[in-house]
Amino acid sequence: MRIRTAASEDFNRICELLQQLWPDKKIDRGALKVVMNRVLSSSNDIYLCAETEQGLMGFCSLAVKNSLWQESRIGTISEMVVDDAYRKRGVGTALLGTIIEMARQRGCRLIELDSAFHRDAAHRFYEKAGFVKRAYLFSKEL
């Protein structure tokens, strides 16, 4: 397995992985392509892929922002997904370890993420990796 930065050629497979993450969501590929292109040219955002000779099996994203609360930078994992067929094989652990190290290298003092209430297995995975529940996430559509 190899962890690497995502490229525009990964778009279709990343869409497939995101569909596994959000099975009830109708993904707008046009809008997603615009966002992906913006991220690929950003210095504050990172997309990582886990792959083998068989292809991409995992994806993770990181956004870095300045935080007055932390008096430094914070890394936010917005998406993390491992193909159903490759779960429990260390793919998520490798992606998470790499993204945490990249956040450290960018001066982040904290890394955080949100996870839907029903994702119990994901919650256990994050807690095992040292993440703690510390807040509720509130959102409002605009």
Image: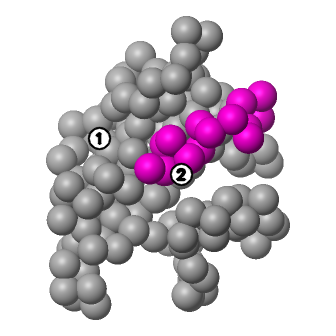
Can residue 115 be seen from the camera position used here?
no
Find the distance from the CA under tag 2 to the CA under tag 1: 16 Å
Packing grade of label 1 (10 A; few <14, some 14-19, many >=20) is few
What stretch of residues is rendered in magenta?
84-97
At 37% from the left and 29% from the top, the residue drawn is 4
**Magenta stretch, overall SS:** helix
Please tell me whether residue 28 is drawn above or below residue 4 in the rendered image: below
Of residues 31 and 93, the one drawn nearer to the viewer in this rendering:
93
**Residue 38's mark?**
1
From what the image shows, is residue 123 above or below residue 95? below
Residue 24, numbered label: none
Q: Quadrant of residue 135?
A: bottom right
Q: Which is nearer the eye, 38 or 13? A: 13
Residue 97 image offset from top left, x and y in percent: 44, 50
Q: Percent position (x, y) of residue 77?
A: 46, 58
Label 2: how many residues lie within 10 Å, few (<14), some (14-19) or many (20+)? some
Residue wearing tag 2: 79
Instruction: Please tell me in which quadrant of the rendered image residue 116 appears.
Output: bottom right
**Of circles 2 and 1, which is in front?**
2
Count of labels shown? 2
Q: Amino acid at mark 1?
A: Arg
Task: Name the amino acid type tagged 2.
Answer: Glu
Closer to the chain start, of discs 2 and 1, is: 1
Instruction: Identify the residue shown where x is 29% and y is 41%.
Output: 38
Q: Residue at x 38, y 56 (%)?
A: 100
Would residue 90 appear left or right of 65 to someone viewing this image? right
